[in-house]
Image: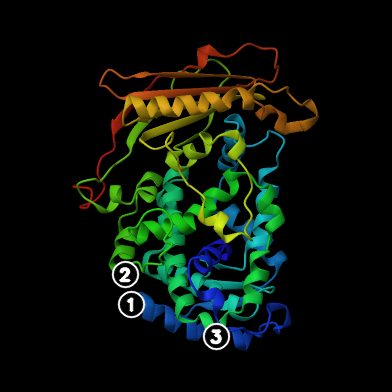
């Protein structure tokens, strides 16, 4: 949906910024429907040539505005996201100290989207929508990106694949990295071939889009988004990290990634663990037993976070800042993981509720005791600064997500797996003690292969 950040990285790592000047976006007339359709048809042909695959049916194209974007987001959310998922995604980051308890995550996310989105593709209607603020050559870059989504959707059924990952944070981020990585890789190739259609004025104007919202957004909001574009591109080109050399992804690799989805963000961040059969690394399946909960407690949600999300949790407080999208070099210096999150083997999280009380248990397993110790040390270094603050009653309903008790346990399972368990509680009455009776039993087992590439 958002091509802005990936365009910046592509331009910063290539010579396109020195291409010939055209008129500034602000001086370019708005698209008519006929012009948009003609330009889209031409770019569809170019996308087919670059990918080596044909569209199965025409793609509708329309111009929309901020109101249309808000309506689309609301409709898409209603169709694909449950209220339970929304509650989980609001409560968990706050209980883990990733964002301030009083922050309205959904409102800030919408603000970021409205500032950053240049266009979006709707799989449900097979339609590309271009924002009415997008003009000139930059609009064509967005078309190349979003039409790649349309091609992938026609070939692989994006919504069906999204449903298959089951709303799990780690698996969903890995899937989105394939989708956005595909769009970014081909978009960059298109931009190299058609750089003369971009002007420096357009690029500079595009760089400033939504900058204020991103500068104040927590890494939880912008880093997974940026990773899906840039680490996804690096994954498909088999280079790892960001594809700063703009290496083309092989069509057969894109095909394989969609047919046999990566199982975790670990595989996205460390591509050899997916592409190399000898290094293929499947996540450990962790299950938490919630069959016998104390009276009054119910399960509100479960999730697997993965290496990318745990990289956010282990980032030092001083480094948890917003992003300046106008500075391409700051974008290229972003790291999507760290030593404390590497060596991830698997994890599982359970969120429980009892009235206004909330309790979270996160079980993580690691490749080695050293990896577990690095994770625990990083979390402990951040936790006192995050969780020992005073409760703000004026925060209203979000105050129930203010952690009032937490602890961390590390050890080794009988079969030799190193683990770290984090528990965080937010009690309706902050004077209540911690809730040790809610230490839930768990177990771990290596996940079964799902395909021939996995060895199954």
Q: Nearer the viewer, residue 115 or 211?
A: 211
**Splitting the image into 4 quarters, where does residue 112 fall?**
bottom right
Query: Residues under labels 1 and 3: Cα distance?
Result: 20 Å
Label 2–label 1 contact, CB within 8 A: yes
Q: Residue at x 56, y 14 (%)?
A: 435
**Residue 73 location, x and y as percent?**
63, 58
Give the mark nearer the N terminus: 2 vs 1: 1
Q: Residue at x 73, y 32 (%)?
A: 397
Q: Is residue 88 visible?
A: yes
**Residue 326 location, x and y as percent?**
64, 61
Per the image, the residue denoted by label 3 is 39
User: Which quadrant of the figure contains the N terminus?
Assistant: bottom right
Q: Residue at x 61, y 88 (%)?
A: 34
Position of residue 401 in the picture relative to residue 161 (left or right): right
Element under label 1? loop
Give the mark nearer the N terminus: 1 vs 3: 3
Residue 251 tag number: 2
Per the image, the residue denoted by label 1 is 52
**Residue 423 location, x and y as percent?**
52, 22
Relative to 364, is 198 above or below?
Answer: below
Query: Residues under labels 2 and 3: Cα distance?
Result: 24 Å
Residue 429 tag number: none
Position of residue 1 in the picture relative to residue 230 (left or right): right
Q: Residue at x 50, y 67 (%)?
A: 10
Give the mark nearer the N terminus: 2 vs 3: 3
**Residue 155 location, x and y as percent?**
37, 69
Q: Residues within 10 Å of mark 2 (few under 14, many from 20)?
A: some
Query: Residues under labels 2 and 1: Cα distance?
Result: 7 Å
């Amino acid at each position: 949906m958002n091509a802005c950040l990936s365009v910046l990285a592509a331009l910063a790592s290539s010579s396109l910024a020195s291409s010939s000047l055209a008129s500034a976006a602000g001086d370019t007339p708005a698209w008519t429907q006929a012009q948009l359709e003609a330009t889209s048809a031409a770019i569809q042909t170019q996308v087919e040539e670059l990918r080596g695959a044909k569209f199965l049916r025409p793609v509708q194209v329309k111009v929309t505005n901020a109101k249309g974007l808000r309506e689309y987001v609301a409709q898409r959310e209603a169709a694909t996201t449950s209220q339970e998922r929304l509650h989980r995604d609001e409560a968990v980051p706050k209980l883990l100290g990733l964002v301030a308890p009083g922050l309205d995550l959904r409102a800030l996310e919408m603000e970021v989207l409205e500032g950053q989105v240049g266009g979006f593709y709707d799989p449900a209607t097979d339609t590309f929508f271009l924002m009415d603020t997008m003009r000139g050559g930059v609009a064509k870059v967005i078309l190349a990106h979003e039409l790649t989504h349309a091609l992938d959707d026609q070939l692989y059924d994006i919504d069906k694949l999204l449903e298959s990952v089951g709303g799990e944070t780690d698996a969903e981020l890995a899937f989105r990295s394939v989708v956005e990585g595909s769009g970014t890789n081909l978009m960059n190739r298109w931009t190299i071939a058609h750089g003369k259609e971009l002007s420096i004025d357009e690029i500079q104007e595009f760089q400033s889009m939504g900058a204020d919202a991103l500068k104040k957004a927590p890494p939880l909001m912008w880093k997974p988004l940026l990773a899906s574009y840039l680490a996804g591109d690096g994954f498909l080109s088999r280079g790892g990290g960001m594809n700063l050399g703009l290496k083309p992804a092989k069509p057969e690799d894109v095909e394989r990634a969609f047919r046999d989805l990566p199982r975790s963000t670990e595989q996205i961040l460390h591509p050899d663990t997916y592409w190399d059969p000898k290094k293929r690394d499947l996540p450990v399946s962790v299950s938490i037993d919630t069959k016998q909960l104390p009276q009054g407690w119910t399960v509100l949600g479960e999730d697997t976070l993965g290496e990318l999300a745990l990289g956010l949790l282990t980032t030092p407080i001083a480094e948890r800042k917003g992003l300046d999208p106008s500075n391409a070099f700051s974008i290229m210096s972003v790291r999507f993981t760290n030593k404390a999150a590497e060596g991830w083997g698997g994890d599982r999280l359970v969120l429980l509720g009892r009235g206004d009380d909330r309790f979270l248990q996160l079980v993580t397993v690691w490749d080695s005791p050293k990896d577990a110790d690095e994770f625990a040390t990083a979390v402990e270094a951040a936790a006192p600064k995050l969780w020992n603050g005073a409760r703000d009653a004026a925060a209203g309903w979000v105050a129930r997500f203010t952690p009032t008790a937490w602890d961390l346990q590390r050890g080794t399972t009988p079969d030799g797996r190193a683990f770290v368990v984090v528990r965080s509680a937010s009690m309706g009455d902050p004077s209540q003690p911690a809730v040790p009776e809610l230490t839930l039993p768990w177990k771990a087992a290596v996940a079964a292969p799902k395909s021939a590439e996995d060895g199954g």
